[in-house]
Amino acid sequence: MANQFQLFKRRRFSAMFFTQFLGAFNDNVFKQALILVLTYTAASQIGVEVSILNNLAAMLFILPYFLFSALAGQIADKYEKSKLTRLTKVLEVTIMSVAAIGFVFEWYTLLFVALFLMGTHSTFFGPIKYAYLPQAMREDELVGANGLFQMGTSLAILVGMIVAGFLTQLPLSLYWISATVVVVAVLGYLASRSIPETPAMQPDLKINWNIFTTSMATVRYLYSLPFLFFVILGNSWFWFYGATFLTQTPEFSKVILFGDESVVIFLLTLFSVGVAIGSLLCKRLTDNQVSLRLLPFGIAGLSIFAIDLYFSLSSLTIISDGTHLFGISDLLSISGSLRVFADLFFLGFSGGLYIVPLYASMQAYAPKSHRARIVGANNIFNAIFMVTSAIFAIVILNVVKMSLPQLFLMTGLLNIVFGLFLYTKLNNHIKQAVIQTHDEPMM
């Protein structure tokens, strides 16, 4: 484990780590603050349903991943990555300045524009950072670097949401939110200035600016590489799985556990810390090898603890008068609650064991000349699976009229089917992937 954290002493890792950490943190401070403002202030002011505003916000943030991921992959393959990173961070400072104006003057249309632009910023940054790692890291550092990146992303999301909740409770909250997102964007730019120069992988690439034909061409190219295609399906399934659970967390906390806002944060913390610890352990458990040996354990854990969550909730008895919401300490004193909390933690832990080997494999086996475009294709599929997750939850909860615990059970059972399919396909195609990359040693 100690060697893994030694990477922070190397500028080629630490500069990109803190750049992406601050970016993910700022994304979530801004998104969560906007959702809270829409929920508690804007909806009543402009006479629109809260659910409509929040779903519109979610759609606007994810839409750029559909539209621009393939283009972003081309740009990241064609140009030097440290300059591209600094340009995206300058863009972030500009967007957050626009958002600050929107918050201060309560111009909600401007805030929605800023949200779309932040989604666009994240879309263009994703292929850069994930194609950068296999270029900047040695082969025996790649799994550890991915584990730290996944840990950092999980914690940045969690801390960003907590900070957003704290800022919205302060006097002059809109000014505090505005100042925070701008300052963090500036810090992200300063971190990006330390990223070492990383040569372009295909400088003679002619960029196709038609986002629709580019997206189709990128997906077709990915499909011609079966191992990478199934790796990316596996990555995207994790986003489906995580979104299914995390999106329901506020309702799960309030309706089933009768918990207050602190319980929501506690549940998110359990899942996120679980992902972080599972991600960090991947380096030791795989002996620094890019390997899928942990994948079956991740798949099994994601199903076992989702199914057990159904049974632990079914046996949990919480009596509430309907007006009083419980805090964390109240719930901890209720028999059976520890099992619920343990299930959430180990769901996250299993997710860490599942996702790090897949991300490392995607980077290690992608052709160098197309590595960023492979990441772009990954982002397209991630967005599709996240939208599918929302539709799946709506159908299960609102059309089929199942309960939240039954939704968790269904997701765990589906994971068994998908996990067996995925592991079989990856094993069938990995030899071909090894042959294809044998003559392309990592830099």
Image: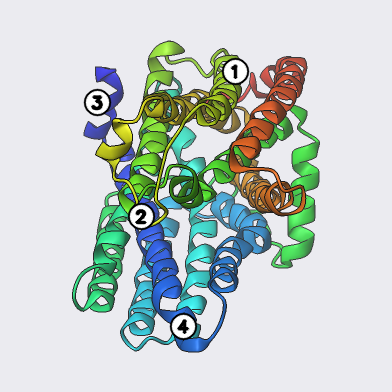
Up/down of 361 relative to 285, above or below: below
Residue denoted by label 3:
6
Q: Could you say which quadrant of the image residue 15 lies in? A: top left
Up/down of 431 relative to 95, above or below: above
Q: Amino acid at mark 1?
A: Ala
Instruction: Say which of 350 and 84 sits in front.
Output: 350
Instruction: Count residues near mark 1 (Cα–Cα under 10 Å), then give few for <14, some for 14-19, many for 20+.
Output: some
Up/down of 372 relative to 433, above or below: below
Q: Residue at x 69, y 36 (%)?
A: 233
Residue denoted by label 2:
161
Q: Residue at x 56, y 33 (%)?
A: 363
Instruction: Count residues near mark 4 (Cα–Cα under 10 Å), then give few for <14, some for 14-19, many for 20+.
Output: few
* Kind of element beneath mark 1: helix
Question: Taking 389 as reference, is 196 left or right?
Answer: left
Query: In front of the other: label 3 or label 2?
Result: 2
Residue denoted by label 4:
44
Instruction: Say which of 321 and 267 sits in front.
Output: 321
Q: CA distance from mark 1 to mark 3?
A: 31 Å
Q: CA distance from mark 1 to mark 4?
A: 45 Å
The percent position of residue 92, horizontal first and vertical second, equals 39, 67
The percent position of residue 402, horizontal first and vertical second, equals 69, 43
Query: In front of the other: label 1 or label 4?
Result: 4
Instruction: Count residues near mark 3 (Cα–Cα under 10 Å), then give few for <14, some for 14-19, many for 20+.
Output: few
Q: CA distance from mark 2 to mark 1?
A: 29 Å
In this view, the residue farthest toward the front is 321
How many numbered marks, from 0 up?
4
Q: Amino acid at mark 3?
A: Gln
Residue denoted by label 1:
300
* Kind of element beneath mark 3: helix
The percent position of residue 70, horizontal first and vertical second, equals 66, 55
